[in-house]
Image (tube, rainbow, N blue to C red):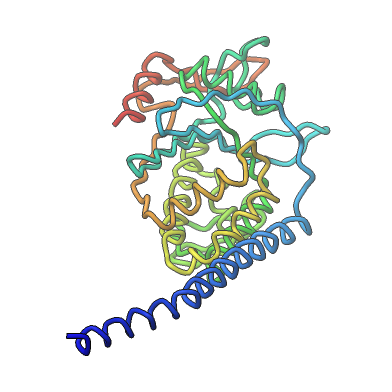
Amino acid sequence: MSEGITPRRKRKKIRLKKLPFVILGLVLLLILVVVFIKSSYNSGLDLAAKHGQKHVNYDFNGVSNKDGKSNVLILGQDRMIDGSARTDSIMIAQYDFLNKKVKIISVMRDIYAEIPGYRNYKINTAYTLGGPDLLRKTIEKNLGVPIEHYAIIDFKGFEAMVDEISPSGVPVNVEKDMSENIDVSLKKGQHNLNGKELLGYARFRHDEEGDFGRVRRQQQVISALKQEMVSLPVLFKTPKLAGIARGYVNTDLKDGEIFRMGTSFVIRGDKKQSTLTVPVKGSFQQASYPEAGSVLEIDKEMNKKAIQKFLNE
């Protein structure tokens, strides 16, 4: 009997002797992972520091819904005019952590809106007058969407992140020749576009569709980037991308929140994405005012209902 027990005891002793080495190996692995994440993150910060602009500190009074969803106001910052900034694009991205959904509302910048404390102007004028917080208030007043955070992306930042996500370019079917006022020349057909080319494609609006065409292309670009981001190689780039985002993107999101969203999207496979363009069809008409120029007058209640339906689906 004792002879039968002895081998088991020996094996147990061997396992116990190996346990410290296993623990040591796991600790070393954890250290390597932490070092890799920190090094990659700093690499992204360094890249942004070489080319990025100094961030402006904005007061932003967004309120959390505390429902597992986060609404982020995403702004593409256009060139500076007489020392003031204007936004080239306005989007509201809702990230649903519980249901793994991403919803994006593209807001047409020519919407004629009531700006709190000012007269009516185009909705993007709110950003010029009072930064992202006044635009937040304007969107909530006119469209009924509460916003928790903001992120302002400059053009160089967009280009850098695209080139890091997909060094060989992002596949896009360019629908026509494009060159006017986008700083690149694009030819019709299927191409792999680098960061600068993809930005130009997303900004083009000199055709019969105007801003509606540009918004459609922006949504197309986001969809193409989403496909690139859920690939395995991008998983290992997540810390560096977070560093680039922190350096290039002016946001009130904390580092942990940026990393959480990025890793959740890439690792968990949060791939359900849907889009909405505001104003919705049949809810607006063209108009013109001396103080604002050509605008879109919208049926606010119709758009509010469409937005709530979209966000609650």
Residue 227 is situated, as x and y percent measured from the top left of the image, at: 41, 59
In the shown orientation, is residue 297 left or right of residue 50? left
197 versus 128 height, above or below? below
Left or right of 290 on screen, residue 18? left
Residue at the image point whose x is 42% and y is 33% from the top = 69
Taking depth in this image into account, of 306 and 256 the one nearest to the observer is 256
Residue found at x 42% / y 65%:
231
- Residue 225 vs residue 250, the one in the foreground: 250
Identify the image quadrant of the C terminus: top left
Q: Nearer the viewer, residue 92 or 180?
A: 92
Q: Residue furthest front?
A: 2
Q: Given the current orientation, which residue lies at the most extreme bottom position?
A: 3
Direction from residue 178 to residue 11 in the image, left or right: left
Q: Which residue corresponds to the image point at 39% horizontal and 38% vertical from the top-left?
A: 96
Percent position of residue 254, x then y: 62, 41
Q: Where residue 236 appears, x then y in whole percent?
A: 52, 66
Residue 302 coordinates in the image, percent (x, y): 36, 17
Quadrant for residue 251, please give it: top right
Q: Quadrant of residue 280?
A: top left
| The N terminus, quarter of image | bottom left
